[in-house]
Image (cartoon, helix red, strand yellow):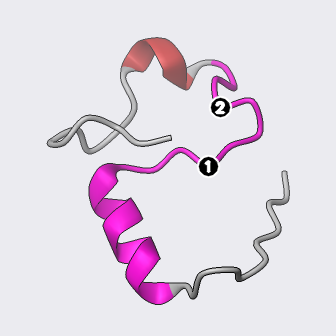
Amino acid sequence: HGLKNGESQLPIYIQSFDWTNGCIAITNEEMDEFIQLVEMGTPIQIEW
């Protein structure tokens, strides 16, 4: 999930519960950086 450009953190109303349903929630800027650092097809393990 991406956040609107310019938003640096989650809005207050969604910080109090798990709204991602198992997905990673990062800003568009963070996603751009992530894409540069991780090769396509790299397995990613999310631990809670």
The residue at which mark 2 appears reads as 20
- Mark 1–mark 2 distance (CA, rounded to whole Å): 7 Å
Compared with residue 7, is residue 12 higher up or lower down, i.e. above or below? above
| Quadrant in which residue 46 is drawn | bottom right
Q: Residue at x 44, y 75 (%)?
A: 35
Compared with residue 11, is residue 24 higher up or lower down, i.e. above or below? below
Q: Is residue 12 left or right of residue 24?
A: left
Q: Is residue 2 left or right of residue 43?
A: left
The disc labelled 1 sits on which kind of residue? Answer: Ile
The picture places residue 33, in percent across and down from the top left corner, at 35, 75
The residue at which mark 1 appears reads as 24
- Which structural element holds mark 2? loop
Compared with residue 25, is residue 43 higher up or lower down, i.e. above or below? below
| Quadrant in which residue 30 is drawn | bottom left
Do callouts 1 and 2 mark residues in contact (Cβ within 8 Å)? Answer: yes
Near mark 2 (Cα within 10 A), the count class, few <14, some 14-19 or many ≥20, is: few
